[in-house]
Amino acid sequence: MLIDEVMTAAEAAKRWHVGVSTIRQACTGYKGGPPRFSREETRQAGSTWLVTVAGMERLYGPEPK
């Protein structure tokens, strides 16, 4: 289901065991660099960043079990 493929940055950080700030920096870019996620993998909804499972797997590998 499509809704299962999108999550907040906080949820993604918890599921992949990385810091929330790491996910946010991948969304926005870091120190003037380009974002690591593509436009299809992330978007901002108000003050909350949303990311896709596919984007997380591309950057951080399969979800740890």
Image (cartoon, rainbow, N blue to C red):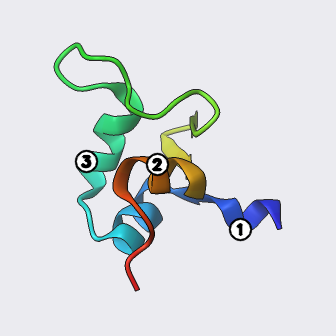
Please name the residue that numbered disc 2 is placed on: 58
Q: Are marks 1 and 2 in contact (CB under 8 Å)?
A: no
Which label belongs to residue 22?
3
Give the alpha-carbon distance from disc 1 to disc 2, as whole Å. Answer: 17 Å
**Given the image, on which type of amino acid does mark 2 rest?**
Arg
Q: Position of residue 9 (x, y in %)?
A: 44, 54
Q: Nearer the viewer, mark 1 or mark 2?
A: 2
Q: Quadrant of residue 24?
A: top left
Give the alpha-carbon distance from disc 2 to disc 3, as whole Å. Answer: 15 Å
The quarter of the rendered structure image containing the C terminus is: bottom left
Q: Quadrant of residue 31?
A: top left
**Image point (37%, 78%), residue name:** 64
Give the alpha-carbon distance from disc 1 to disc 3, as whole Å. Answer: 22 Å
- Dot 2 or dot 3, earlier in sequence: 3
Q: Position of residue 51 (x, y in %)?
A: 54, 48
**Image point (46%, 34%), residue name:** 37
In the image, taking residue 38 as reference, residue 64 lies left or right, namely left
In the image, taking residue 15 as reference, residue 46 lies left or right, namely right
Which label belongs to residue 56?
none
Q: Viewer-proximal residue, 32 or 63?
A: 63
In the image, taking residue 32 as reference, residue 5 lies left or right, namely right
Please name the residue that numbered disc 1 is placed on: 4
**Given the image, on which type of amino acid does mark 3 rest?**
Thr
The quarter of the rendered structure image containing the N terminus is: bottom right
Q: Viewer-proximal residue, 52 or 44?
A: 52
